[in-house]
Image (cartoon, grey):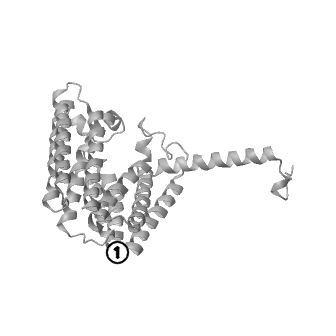
């Protein structure tokens, strides 16, 4: 039976057009929601924030280049995350936390996920390369290669994979720095990248305490299973204090120039260290609360560095 379509849109009844527009809008929103889940949008945006910090620290001002470099970083990060979900689709299907992700849920095919990842990584790296120079583009490609080519596979066989994997978190600030015209070999950006490298380790281990049992069910090596909760709490507490101390190296490398910024780093470092100490004092080990605290701490450090660079 043939379906007769109107020749002009004004031939469609108003109510019918409204319903059609509503369905189209709903489908578009659903597609965007799936894309955001596939590309781990919140994590990708977090990478962009640290890249923006690196950019501002070199440029010492807000400018349009921060937006274009940020767009390149977020596109590449989204693409790498899409590839990661493609690589981890069978593992994700075994865990309650991840089984409803787009690929294991059957919402996105493997081929589509690969193409989306390739388009986003290629677009992001190209944007950075052509607008901000080869160093920024190469660092972006290196971050994707390390994440998808090394860490994603290493975490399946080694409980300490997060330590070399933390290099992924150290690269976005360097990308932003290079995009602003800075040299990737400058000791100042090495100090900032070192801070994010150290921060990444307790950040992941705290998350692991929340979802660790699912990691074990999925067959992934888990440090929690090897050490137990109490020893894990001691280990994470030590790394939190190391993270706090590493932030105090930033003024020594000239990344802050004002007394109030250095004082702010000291106050937040002591606060985070005390938050980490709660893991040793409280019998229930408040891993989730400490996980939130370490995320707030990174935002505080980035804000203090950026404001110091802009206002000084």
Q: Is residue 233 left or right of residue 92?
A: left
Identity of the residue furthest to the top in this view: 283
Image x and y of residue 106, in percent? 54, 45
Tell me the SS state at disc 1.
Answer: helix
Q: Is residue 242 visible?
A: yes
Residue in front for this viewpoint, 42 or 65: 65
Q: Is residue 5 visible?
A: no
Residue in front for this viewpoint, 153 or 243: 243
Image x and y of residue 166, in percent? 26, 53
Residue in front for this viewpoint, 97 or 182: 182
Q: Check the image and report above or below for 106 versus 150.
A: above
Number of numbered discs on residues: 1
Q: Residue at x 53, y 47 (%)?
A: 34
Q: Residue at x 19, y 52 (%)?
A: 260
> In which quadrant is the C terminus drawn?
bottom left
Image x and y of residue 267, in percent? 18, 44
Image x and y of residue 108, in percent? 54, 50
Q: Residue at x 41, y 48 (%)?
A: 42
Where residue 256 sits, quadrant-wise, is bottom left
The crowd level at tag 1 (other Cα within 10 Å; few <14, some 14-19, many 20+) is some
Q: Residue at x 32, y 67 (%)?
A: 139
Query: Which residue is label 1 attached to?
Result: 134
Residue in front for this viewpoint, 125 or 262: 262
Q: Check the image and report above or below for 303 versus 276.
A: below
Q: Check the image and report above or below for 296 versus 145.
A: above
């Amino acid at each position: 039976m043939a379906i007769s379509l109107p020749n002009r849109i004004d031939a469609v009844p108003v109510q019918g057009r409204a319903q059609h527009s509503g369905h189209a809008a709903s489908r578009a929103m659903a597609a965007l929601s799936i894309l955001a889940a596939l590309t781990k949008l919140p994590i990708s945006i977090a990478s962009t924030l640290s890249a923006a910090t690196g950019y501002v620290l070199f440029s010492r001002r807000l400018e349009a280049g921060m937006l274009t470099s940020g767009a390149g970083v977020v596109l590449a990060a989204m693409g790498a995350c899409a590839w990661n979900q493609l690589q981890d689709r069978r593992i994700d299907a075994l865990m309650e936390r991840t089984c409803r992700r787009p690929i294991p849920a059957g919402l996105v095919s493997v081929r589509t996920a690969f193409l989306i990842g390739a388009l986003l990584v290629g677009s992001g790296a190209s944007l950075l390369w052509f607008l901000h120079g080869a160093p920024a583009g190469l660092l972006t490609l290196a971050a994707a290669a390390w994440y998808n080519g090394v860490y994603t596979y290493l975490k399946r066989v080694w409980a300490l994979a997060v330590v070399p994997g933390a290099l992924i978190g150290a690269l976005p600030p360097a990308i932003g720095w290079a995009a602003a015209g800075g040299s990737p070999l400058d000791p100042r950006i090495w100090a900032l990248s070192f801070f994010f490298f150290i921060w990444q380790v307790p950040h992941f281990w705290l998350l692991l305490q929340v979802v660790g049992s699912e990691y074990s069910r999925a067959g992934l090596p888990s440090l929690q299973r090897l050490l137990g909760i109490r020893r894990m709490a001691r280990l994470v507490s030590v790394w939190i204090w190391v993270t706090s101390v590493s932030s105090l190296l930033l003024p020594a490398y000239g990344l802050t120039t004002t007394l109030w910024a250095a004082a702010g780093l000291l106050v937040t470092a002591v606060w985070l260290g005390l938050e980490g100490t709660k893991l040793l004092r409280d019998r229930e080990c408040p891993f989730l609360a400490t996980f939130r605290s370490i995320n707030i701490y990174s935002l505080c450090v980035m804000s203090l560095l950026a404001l110091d660079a802009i206002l000084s």
